[in-house]
Amino acid sequence: MKYEVITSPFYCTALQIAFIKGQIVEIKNTKRAGELVDAGLLAVVDKKKSTRKKKVNKDV
């Protein structure tokens, strides 16, 4: 799942990764990611739904 870092830079010892404010990161460890979201350090990035555009035949 993808998350955005919303606080000042910090280092997570459990994940062994440094986070920089504004960075988008993908974290597989959902338990640790949930703890970081609850602490206000990360925010979930919403998934964009793909939209299909209907093709219009202009040769009428």
Image (cartoon, rainbow, N blue to C red):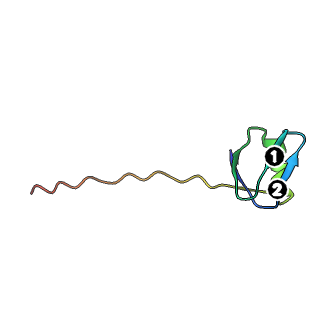
Residue 47 is situated, as x and y percent measured from the top left of the image, at 59, 52
Amino acid type at image mark 1: Ala
What secondary structure is marked by label 2?
Answer: loop
| Image point (30%, 54%), residue name | 54
- Within 10 Å of disc 1 (Cα), the crowding (few <14, some 14-19, many 20+) is few
Vertically, is 27 above or below 54? above
Screen quadrant of the C terminus = bottom left
State how many labels appear: 2
Residue 32 is situated, as x and y percent measured from the top left of the image, at 84, 44
| Image point (78%, 42%), residue name | 30
**Separation of marks 2 and 1 at Cα, in angstroms:** 7 Å
Query: Which residue occupies the foreground of this view, 4 or 53?
Result: 4
What secondary structure is marked by label 1?
Answer: strand
Marks 2 and 1, the one that precedes in the sequence: 2
Vertically, is 58 above or below 30? below
Residue on which the image places disc 2: 9
Residue 17 is situated, as x and y percent measured from the top left of the image, at 81, 42
Query: Which residue occupies the foreground of this view, 50 or 13?
Result: 13
| Image point (42%, 53%), residue name | 51
Residue on which the image places disc 1: 18
Amino acid type at image mark 2: Pro
| Numbered circle sitting on residue 29 | none
- Within 10 Å of disc 2 (Cα), the crowding (few <14, some 14-19, many 20+) is few
Give left or right: position of 55 versus 33: left
Q: Quadrant of residue 28?
A: top right
Residue 57 is situated, as x and y percent measured from the top left of the image, at 17, 54
Screen quadrant of the N terminus = top right
Q: Look at the numbered discs 2 and 1 and tell me whether their residues touch, using CB distance below 8 Å.
A: yes
Query: Which residue occupies the foreground of this view, 25 or 8?
Result: 8
| Image point (82%, 56%), residue name | 9
